[in-house]
Amino acid sequence: MSEPTSDVRNQIGPEKAGPDVVILSEAGKPIFSRWGNEEDLSTVCGIVQAIRATTVDDDSFGLGEIQSLRSGKLTIVFLTAGALTFIAIATLGPESDCETEAYLRLQLEYIYAQVIFTLTEQVHEVFKQSPGFDLRNMLGGTDSVMRGILDKAGALGNGGFFLTAGVETVCPLSADIREDLSQILQYVGEQTEHTLYAILLLGNKLVTLIQPSYRPHQLRSSDLHLITSFVVNQPGLLTTELWFPICLPRFNSSGFLHAYTSCLHRGTELNLILISQHKTTEQFNSFRNAAQMMKVELGLAPDTDESSVIKATDDEAQEHEDETLDGETKSESDDEAQSKNEGDENPNVNISPPRGSLESEQNKQEEESDFIKAIQEATNPNIQEALINDYCNLASALHFIFRCDVPVFGGGDSQQDRGMLTQSISPPLGFPFVDVPSKRRIWNMYQRLSLRLRLGSAADEATNDAFDMIKEDNDESASGDFSHIGKDCPAMCLMESPPNVHGVTYVLDGSELFVGLNGRDFELYAVLPGTIPPRNGTALCARLVRRLMQDETELFLDNPLTWDEH
């Protein structure tokens, strides 16, 4: 393969701190490009699909699908799912380092999951009917969401939550406060019919979550990542209530659920998310009442202004469910929407917040809420910095990420019947890792440590063998970890699954010592000064793990509730 042109090289260079990601159809038509305009890649996309088709269709090669290519400083990773091809193009950094193929594949799988989140797997039926179909219109404004996922997973973001398949939580938060919030959310959800999931978020951080006790219906970490990424990227989230269709790819990739969001407290960005299988106006109204009940239970002023309601029908989302190809968004007056919604089962609803004196009364009550005070204290930047510094000093660490697998009780008596809610701590990289190359080197080394703990090797061959085994397991089982899009996402399955055995691994690289450590229900990755001997560094990391597990109740949601608990 020839070297890329200067324009393409500039788009995907290391200064971008992440790979270019391109989506194209089976016909070679570009759908999305992270850097630049996908129209500029039309010729390249057509060539790529021609190369793929030649390799797959010619039995003399006997190679099957192309997984990756290397050319000079470029690493190119492919993911093919149905009629869609996803490509990650990464370049070697100044220190000749690059993301692992496994992590590049993981990012592609998240982008594929985001497409399914928006359109369901019925998108593949669209291309069967019309191979040259332009999917960009159906994806709508989700480009920003996909770029947001890639930015967070990159060197300038915080890839620790993707690498450990863990959800970011609000911490430190008193165990009593979190338990009270969980019980309030559970109570409100149980008073509201057809509530499948109830989630309390602070920005993109999880406060608490209530979900079914039946393990196959419990949320996977990847679905939680998609929910938080989508919600925080919605314009007007803090000033309106939203009602929109979503598909949770690891729960059911073939159909829509319907999500309601309401900002309970704008000052802290405390948001309530309620999800149901029902899409009726009555369900929306039930969720809206639940949000008001939640505010009352939290000591906040409920909304009482019913006059400023704007309702709009999202025809595009409705037609996705009807498996048609053209969608159009229409706006209506309040009276027209009220008349139409008597027979319309899928409204998107935006509701303006109360103004004037009601806002003053609400602010006064919010100041007196113990829950809001506790949340504000937990998210105070000075407290956050002191907490992380305390942990780092305990192990003489420059940085660390930590994963904790918390059991979800209520799913059965045996350990196999219990699900896991994986949560993580991943502080942003600070001094001395202040530039892009140093940040990139740290994240890339963490990726290799993770693969070593899981596979015994960070080599690409070991990764591809593991992916093949996961796919073979999927062929033998249509349920569990590999159901729905899990069959196309072995990297997600690999990262979500904890290492099978307890292990320790380390790399002494220049002036830094990198340590990976795992045991029952935890993983730790840390970077220490290279002057510390590996044996001592491992002991220091073990001390840090003990402290983190000791503080588990304040750092994580350590008692996730389900609907059948009382």
Image: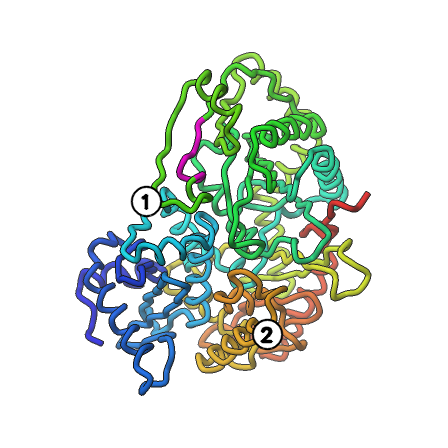
Q: Amino acid at mark 1?
A: Asn
Q: Which residue is mark 1?
A: 137
Residue sitting nearer the eye, 514 or 170? 170
Q: Is residue 396 visible?
A: no
Determine which of the numbered discs, if any, sits on residue 301 in the image.
Answer: none
> Which quadrant would the C terminus be assigned to in this image?
top right
Residue 154 horizontal/vertical position (percent):
42, 59
Q: Residues within 10 Å of mark 2 (few under 14, many from 20)?
A: few
Residue 202 horizontal/vertical position (percent):
58, 40
Which residue extends farthest top?
357
The residue under the point 32% across, 58% down is 16
Q: Residues within 10 Å of mark 1 (few under 14, many from 20)?
A: some
Region in magenta: 312-318
Judged from the image, the secondary structure of the residue bearing numbered disc 2 is helix
Residue sitting nearer the eye, 272 or 345? 345
Residue 411 horizontal/vertical position (percent):
75, 56
In the rendered view, does 303 fall on the left or right side of 155?
right
Q: Quadrant of residue 26?
A: bottom left
Q: Quadrant of residue 181?
A: top right
> Which quadrant would the N terminus be assigned to in this image?
bottom left
Residue 234 horizontal/vertical position (percent):
45, 38
Query: Image height check: is 386 above or below 202?
Result: below
Task: Give the foreground label among 1 and 2.
Answer: 2
The residue under the point 63% across, 66% down is 395
In the rendered view, does 87 fall on the left or right side of 551?
left
The mark nearer the N terminus, 1 or 2, is: 1
Q: Amino acid at mark 2?
A: Glu
Q: Which residue is mark 2?
A: 476
Q: Is residue 317 visible?
A: yes
